[in-house]
Amino acid sequence: MGASMVDDLTLPRAASRPPTASSGLRLAWLVALAAPLVILLALPGLHEPLSAARYLPVHTVLELLVVGVAFATFGVQWFAAREFPDRRAQVIGPAFLAVGLFEALHLLTFPGMPGVGGPGTTERGIYYWFLARLWTVGTLVWVARLPPSDRSLRPGRARLLVPHLVAVTAFVAVELALPGDRAFFYVEGGGLTSAKVGLELFVAAVALVGALVHHRAARAGDRGARTLAAALAVTVLSELSLTLYARPFDPVHVLGHAYLVLTFFLIFRALFVGAVVAPHRELVALRSHIENELNVTIAELRATKESREDLLRAVSHDLRNPLQIVLLKAQVLGRHGAKPGAAEKAARDIALAGRRMERMLRDLADAARLESGAALALQRAAVDVRAFVAEAIELNRGVFDPQRLEVAVPDGLPPVHADPDRLDRVLVNLVGNALKHTAGRVVVSANPAGAFVRISVMDEGPGIAPEDQQRIFQRYVRGPGREADGLGLGLYIVRRLVEAHGGEVELVSAPAAGSTFSFTLPVATPG
């Protein structure tokens, strides 16, 4: 019941149920915990004192649990405070070493136990009981004013511990100096004194105030404060039990110690979660995050490596082809007696191959510049679209098939504000790709689009699958079915050059329905 109660009472999941439901559940648990005390008081038959032979083992076990948890609370803080400093834990830990010592003295000085510096009596046991309660409740109320993340004051562990040990020694010396037949808290045959009842009620009142203060902090999201609030609430039940018993071996006295065990368990849990469990969870989450980031980085590095290897293969392959043309045609020109027609054709082929090589190298240079984050320098001018398209196609007549190429650029289009050299590369890349991917007709058209002019290249090819339509604009990615042709930079450069002009690239395509690549350029303004 204890573990379940703690989970529901002190650490409800805010995301799983509303605050009103959580508050109602915690109230229900407190009522359930108070029920045994009410039943004992309501049924006199259950309220009869036990024999010493039956009572002492139960009391001893309960007190040993309290002592053990108090020392464990101190130990967790002592070894975890340096690595995971929590201001509240730094204060609670040393205080609970003193609490553990007072609880041990209470156990040893209880009637029927060996005693320390004298026989065990009810009066002596109550003395150390009060010291343990005052130390516990006082510490928990004191830390309510300390946020756990406050690290402005971080005294050494020994400086926090020494005052508590000095206080324990002083109170033991005072108790040993008091008369052995005193009756400040308990009168044999008469029961508890008004001083004892008053002190218990005072401790209960202070614990109730502390529970409310911690509960207010818990409402702001402090999970540790929620647990400490529950511990102080159970302390109130324990103190009420210790005001109602009439004889040392009363069952209500046993119940008060059972409440005390639960109180110490909750306190230990608050410090253990804060000092060990929470940092462990953070480390596990951080490790998972780092592993995910590492996996992503490794995947990106592998993809980059593969892309660069593909690029090197493409460069070695595609630059070699026009270079072979240059070399072969140069040999033709160098032969003696070469016919004028053959020389003219060889010169034209050399020019086209050289231009192709130059375009590839410029694509590589621009891609490297863009990868480094440098901006492209544009030499803009007013460009007549119709005349520019016609001239670009004429200059590439040896590469383009004019019989499959149709120009549908109307007269009267406004000039665009563009870099002619970069615009030539955009147009040639799109037209060249369209001609490579279709055996049918390729249409180049242009239309006004507000403050822009839209230039389109439409083909009747096999089309592009939807999952490939964004990917083909990435660098070093070649179109489907053309894995061994080109550097995979054409469409990437097209997109980046158009964006540098302030325009956009659009692709409309579907399998077996052809493709239309279009891009916009701003209209040139007068002057």
Image: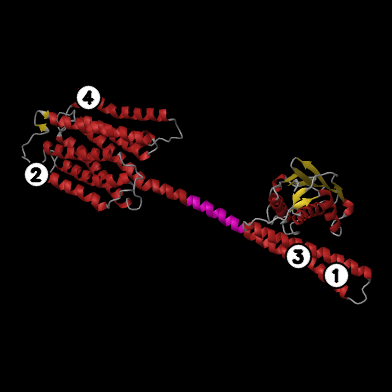
Q: Amino acid at mark 2?
A: Leu
The x and y percentages for residue 354 are 80, 65
State the CA–CA distance, disc 2 to disc 3: 100 Å
Q: Which residues are magenta?
A: 287-302
Say which residue label 3 marks.
Answer: 319
> Which of labels 2 and 4 is toward the front?
2
Tell which of 199 and 148 is nearer to you: 148
Return the disc, 2 or 3, that comes first in the chain's sequence: 2
Q: Find numbered disc 1 in the image and state the secondary structure of the residue it sits on.
A: helix
Residue at 87%, 55% in the rendered image: 401
For the residue marked with disc 4, what is the amino acid? Leu
Residue hosting label 2: 176
Residue 1 seen by the camera: no
> Where does label 4 land, which residue?
41
Q: Quadrant of the N terminus?
A: top left
Is residue 297 located in the magenta-colored stretch of the structure? yes
Q: Nearer the viewer, mark 4 or mark 3?
A: 3
Q: Is residue 335 left or right of residue 69?
A: right
Badge 4: few (under 14), some or many (20 or more) residues near its Cα, within 10 Å?
A: some
**Does the residue at mark 4 contact the one at mark 1 (Cβ under 8 Å)?**
no
Are the two marked residues, 2 and 4, in contact with CB atoms closer than 8 angstroms? no
Q: Which residue type carries mark 1?
A: Lys
Sooner in the amino-acid sequence: mark 4 or mark 1: 4
Residue placed under numbered mark 1 in the picture: 329
Q: Main secondary structure of the magenta part?
A: helix
Counting residues from the N terminus, which is met first, the one under dot 2 or under dot 1? 2
What colour scheme was applied to this rendering of the protein? Answer: secondary structure
Between disc 4 and disc 3, whose residue precedes?
4
